[in-house]
Image (cartoon, grey):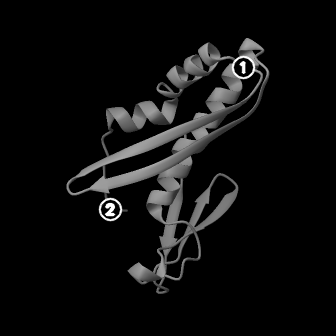
Amino acid sequence: MARARASIGTVDYATSIATGHHKLTADEGPELGGKDAGPAPYDLLTSALGACTVITLRMYAEHKKWPVTAVHADIHFVREGDKQRIDRVLTIEGAVDDEQKKRMADIAERTPVTLTLKGGLEIRTTLA
């Protein structure tokens, strides 16, 4: 299953991430003391949800042989006081009708990352 290793040194707050054979950099913006060398943690979270959403919907459209030419998911993490949520807006391109688009929106509610975020999960922390 998915695995990542994040490491930080003394440069505020540049973080090296290795996942599989990929290397990423995360950081905070200048307003939080970083240098904006990469996406911030919540940007990575929304990116993961967006990627899972469009990949799943592309697979679904291919399985149904629907003429979808592109799928876009705009993901926005919103915090209002002590409440937080994610707003997701789908744009589906191609010669598909409103019923097909509605079905794809229903499928988006059941993508793997969506279900994980909605259900919550246990995080176990130990020391090496």
Q: In the rendered image of this protein, does residue 34 appear above or below residue 105?
A: below
What residue is shown with label 1? 96
The answer to whether residue 3 of the structure is visible from this angle is no
Relative to 41, is 47 on the left or the right?
right
Residue 48, above or below 94: below
Q: Nearer the viewer, residue 88 or 11?
A: 88
Q: Residue 46, how many percent across, how many down?
A: 50, 50
At horizontal 68% and vertical 57% (from top left) the residue drawn is 22
Q: Give the quadrant of the N terminus.
A: top right
Q: The residue tagged with tag 1: helix, strand or loop?
A: loop
| Residue at x 41% of width, y 35% of height | 116
**Label 2: which secondary element:** loop
* Residue position marked by numbered label 2 in the rendering: 127
In this rendering, does residue 23 appear at all? yes
The mark found on residue 80 in the picture is none
Q: How far is the residue under mark 2 from the one under mark 1? A: 51 Å
Pinpoint residue 113: horizontal percent, then vertical percent: 48, 36
Identify the residue at the far bottom of this view.
10
Task: Give the vertical position of 2 relative to 109 (above or below).
Answer: below
- At x 36% / y 53%, what residue is drawn? 78
Query: Mark 2 and 1 residues: CB-CB less than 8 Å, in contact?
Result: no
Where, by quadrant of the figure, is residue 56 drawn?
top right
The amino acid type, in three-letter code, at marker 2 is Leu
